[in-house]
Image: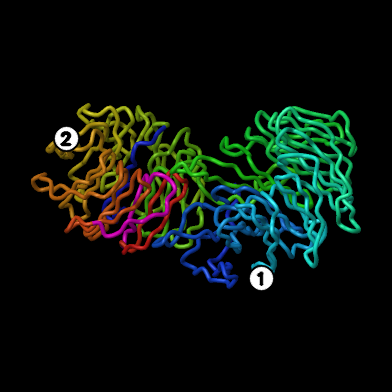
Amino acid sequence: MHRPLLLLSLLVCVSCKSRESKPPDVDHAPVAAPEKDGEPKVVEKSMLDLYGDALPQGATGRLGSLRMVDRSIRQMIFTPEGSQVISTHRDGYQIWNLTDGSRGAVLEHESPGDLMAISPNGNLLATGDDEGATVQIWDMGTGKKSAQVAASSHLIGLCFLSNKNLMAAFAKGEIRIWDLDGEGTVFQGKWQDPTTLSCAPKVGWAAVGTDDGHAFAIEIDTKNFSVKGATELGKASKAITTSAVASDGSSFAFGSADENIYLWYEPKEGEPFSMQAHDRTVENLAYTADNSELYSTGGDSWFRKWNPKDGELIEELPGIDGLDAQLMALSPDGNLLVSWSQHGGARGSEAGRWWLWNAKTGALLLEPERHRGAITSVQFSPDGTQIVTTSEDKSARLWDAKSTKSAGELAGAAGIVNAAHFSNDGKTVFSAGADAVVRAWAVDADTKSVVIDGVGGAVNCFLMTNDGQRVITGDQIGRVWSWDRTSGNQIQAYDGRRYSAIYDIALSPDGRLLAIAGSARIVGVIDLERGQEIAELNPGDTTANFAVAFSPDGTLLATAGDGHEIQLWNTKDWTRRITLDGHDGTVRALAFRPDSKRLISGGNDEMVRIWDVASGKQSAALEGHEGVVTSVAVAPDGSQFVSASRDRTALIWRMP
């Protein structure tokens, strides 16, 4: 994994590992997004991946997708026609196109709030700022702010009653209805600390819940757009966290921190119908357009569908990857469900991802081709036209290096796949991993065969000799063995039983030397012809070495491990030539450019770094991954390189 795939020498290794439908055909057309002053700016082609997501500076493509990934999403709503979703996040309000899953415009705001509401005709978007001081009205056609109204206290809910009448609830119990062409009305409720507002404007009802668990039905004069009054329906044992009103006014639903949903069938005080809905706080409620179903989410990784007439559970869908299903929105026709789940980001951030579902079948829609687990290795094909990645999701994937589109999934392994490489002619991909089997996959056909069965331990890395006749494996129990590729028989052991685990191995360009990195301070160098160790390299600041790579000209060996330094060793006398210092933490990946003048590295600091080999100086530090960089590889012509990460994606970079 940590070095270029040379035309004359096929090899691949990978650092130790800790344990859908195809993407739309989207070109890289420029996308307009409003500036803060309302004027659109053009995002250039090179800045976007297949799904409209921005690429980091210096990157030309992304394998897999960060589409539908964002930080701290706090609310999502569908546009009335159901073709777009709007989410509020830390930079503003992101518009997503559901035809292809790409990002659209961003309505930029310095302090975006949690709340949004869209007018029935879809022309206006109302948003509240994070400080609760104002409500902004956006023209959806131009992306510009068309109006702004002052808030009386912290905003807790917004909904449009008509195309020009906006209802808002505030923390001090006040409800306001603004006529966007005129003044508006104010109603002071008999409650304290409201937490949620929802509306059924056609029938003149709204719902308010409070922090102490009270539920209220609000009657609206739909002719004059004012509040007639409020009726207390009842009380939950804990705070009301979400609410929904059936569009025909037939029922009022409230979700609570006590894990229950409460249903009232008339806007008057009485005993509600209640059901234990989730194992944690109920986060969202939504009726279908015909009011025949009620959807809910909670912090327990489940979406549940209920019959609001009797409270019976109709169906439940599990969340993805065990993530809590924290937010949900239902399309106006009830056919689409969008959900967002939060997870701990690489730096402890509030990163998350959202999914689009067919609400009727539970099928995921617009799912990009991407790995479902951390990527463990990456390599170019000999002609540089394809890339192979391996993953903890028990698969390898092929990618078109130019278009970055997926070219197929190689599934069927019984465990994590840790390494893969191409044959000399590029027609076969070999892979190996936790199931201790080396497999051969035909690139142009969905066929596979076992090359070596029963290596003994989980294969962390492997390579093939220059003639393609022998396979050398490094495993999780500290063994380095060579195998006859045709018979699958073991030929020789090279590790000397020094390591409890092997993390990487590298073959010199002439095929004579093998470098071994593992769970020891020493990097061993083996003469393959004699089967003897000829050098012991001690980097000094490491207790384990995770990456080794020979320079293509054969004069240098690079080593790196759980220290932050990279060592370059002369292969003539095995003296240390230079130390490269710049990473913040463990270095896990190394790859030389074909001319041996540059070295690429990646590690736990989520950075990809480029080094000038002659001077030892760092020439570039590339940001863009949201997880540990596990593997790097350089294209055979040296024009670009690729880095893979635990964030489930790989980035293609132009070579400086």
**Seen in the image, is 635 located left or right of residue 392?**
left
Q: Quadrant of residue 279?
A: top right
Q: Residue at x 46, y 49 (%)?
A: 649
> In front here: 586 or 470?
586
> In front here: 346 or 46?
346
What element does badge 1 sit on?
loop
Q: Can residue 506 be seen in this view?
A: no
Task: Residue lying at the far left in this picture: please name it.
Answer: 573
Nearest-to-viewer mark from 2 and 1 = 1
x%, y% of residue 317? 68, 36
Question: In the rendered image of this protein, does residue 113 appear above or below residue 146?
Answer: above
Question: In the rendered image of this protein, does residue 387 appear above or below residue 293?
Answer: below
x%, y% of residue 314? 78, 34
x%, y% of residue 615? 17, 58
Q: Residue 142 carries which label?
A: 1
x%, y% of residue 613? 20, 56
Q: Which residue is drawn at 36% across and 34% down?
A: 459
Residue at image mark 2? 531
Q: Residue at x 67, y 33 (%)?
A: 281
Dot 2 surroundings within 10 Å: few (below 14), some, or many (20 or more)? few
Q: Is residue 121 visible?
A: yes
Three-letter amino acid code at disc 1?
A: Thr
> In front here: 141 or 417?
141
Q: Residue at x 58, y 73 (%)?
A: 39
| Span colored in magenta | 618-637
Q: State yes or no: residue 382 in magenta.
A: no
Three-letter amino acid code at disc 2?
A: Gly
